[in-house]
Image (tube, rainbow, N blue to C red):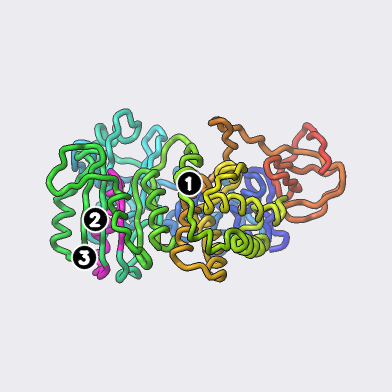
Amino acid sequence: MAGVRVFFEGSAYSVGEGESVLETLIRGGANVTFSCRKGTCQSCMLETVRGEPGEGAAKGLRSALVDAGMFLPCCAHPTRDLEVRRPDPAKLFTRLQLAEKEWLSPSVCRLSFEPETNLDWKAGQFVNLRRSDGVVRSYSIASIPEEDYFLTVHVKRIEGGVMSTWLCDELEVGDAIDAQGPIGSCYYDPADSAKNLLLLCTGSGLSPLYGIVRDALRQGHTGEIHLFHASKTADGLYLRDELRALAREHAQLRYTASLTQQADLPEGVVEGRVVARAFERGPDLAGWMVYLCGIPEMVYEGRHQAVLAGAARADIRADPFEYAHPYQPDDSRKLAQIAPDPELWEALERGPGLMRILTSFYDAAFVDPRLAPFFHRVTKQRAIEQQYAFLADLFSGRRAYFGLRPFNAHHWMIISDELFDYREAAMEAVLRAYGLSEPLIRRWAAVHELFRREIVKSSARGMIIAGVEQAMAPPERVVVELPCVCDGCEAEMNVGETARYHAHGGQLFCEACAGVPSRSRPPPSISP
């Protein structure tokens, strides 16, 4: 790997030991799009100009994309220099022709498309549909290719919605539309055929779960299947007859429909929010698979409750709807709702046990290649003290912590769901080594899970002060005034060399790591 560089948009980036191409570009400050960082969402896709991205860099991509030189930088580990560019959008999309259109309820329309080229999809994945003017929206797939032939999505018509009103009101049978995908990992795996399944959805979040349930039954699923579907009004509870018929035909399937804002309940429909209904009997979800699709508030609350009930994070498949506006953190409300845990606090010896656990965890985290970069210029003792103050405050109920809340503490960190789960798995291993019981580990883990939405993000955010997000200062090109070492590749930097300074992390990168192009105007000077 030594000496391997990635060339992107006129800049060169040195690949660090064990880094993917995406990690290299992110570290160097390149303006790249990404999300999951594990090859699922495909949002980071780039095109090869020269060189080879390495084995596994094209996993999950359609053959047409692979033939066009596309690859996923999050999965790419080149062994030689690689030149890449942003892909031609025309190469990423295929054409779909609308074959059938049917209203499933007054607010939900089913659109069935026939692809012009062969697409291999799974029910539960999603496609990005693009209108001729460039507007793009994601829709989950409800159909099973082995049974339904057409690629089908359920679209909730939202008054004033740019894409949904056009799809429901104007797109006609025979019309064509561009589509990217299929994308995503929220689908049924036959390897889980003996596991119990818990599926929660709101509104048109039923679309992927309707396909997943039918796919599981088609493939001979033997475990229990519990499907909960909620909506504000009865219009959103579509496909009730079809799902009740499936439940009558398959003894392992239980279907519950609920309403949250309608007093007169239709026959067979109950009242209440979907998460409350699903967890009202305190199920033990150890060994269960959990699927969550719909509005983000439900999905993240469902994840929190699933972890508390014993579901492994690796067994949770979540597909929250995406909003156009950025998420505004809710740290204060979430912190206020966490009740003290006297039993856990006693098990932690009212403090000394917590300190030993955190010391063991951060001893490992500070040498972990995936976690250590997030503690740059933070001493281990400082990290332990801050986390101790935060958790001791919650577990004991003393409410004396005045440090940064979860969002602001992580605002500049780009953390994926996968990395969040990786960190939590490492923490839970330490808790088990310490000897905490599984119920106590679940309760600790659920506290962390409560703040997933504040921590996980695909791009850096500014701190929020008095309800206003502060703009982050961009990296600054500087001249080195004292000899120093690059925070990226640890190469020596001499006086007079140019570098890029990241104020939020106090990091200084050499030109190779930062990928700084040459400019005619000299940069300002700085002493590291």
**Which badge, 3 or 2, comes first in the chain's sequence?**
2
Dot 1 amino acid type: Arg
The numbered mark at residue 252 is: 3
Q: Residues within 10 Å of mark 1 (few under 14, many from 20)?
A: many
Dot 3 amino acid type: Gln
Query: Magenta stretch: residue 274 in it?
Result: no
Where does the C terminus fall, quadrant-wise?
Answer: top right
**Which badge, 1 or 3, comes first in the chain's sequence?**
3
Q: Which residue is mark 1?
A: 453
Where is residue 119? Give x, y as percent: 34, 55
Q: Secondary structure at mark 1?
A: helix
Query: Magenta stretch: residue 211 in it?
Result: yes
Magenta residues span 197-223
Where is residue 282? Give x, y as percent: 32, 59
Nearer to us in this view, 364 or 418: 364
Residue contact at pointers 1 and 3, CB within 8 angstroms: no
Q: Secondary structure at mark 3?
A: loop
- Looking at the image, residue 405 sits to the left or right of residue 495; the answer is left
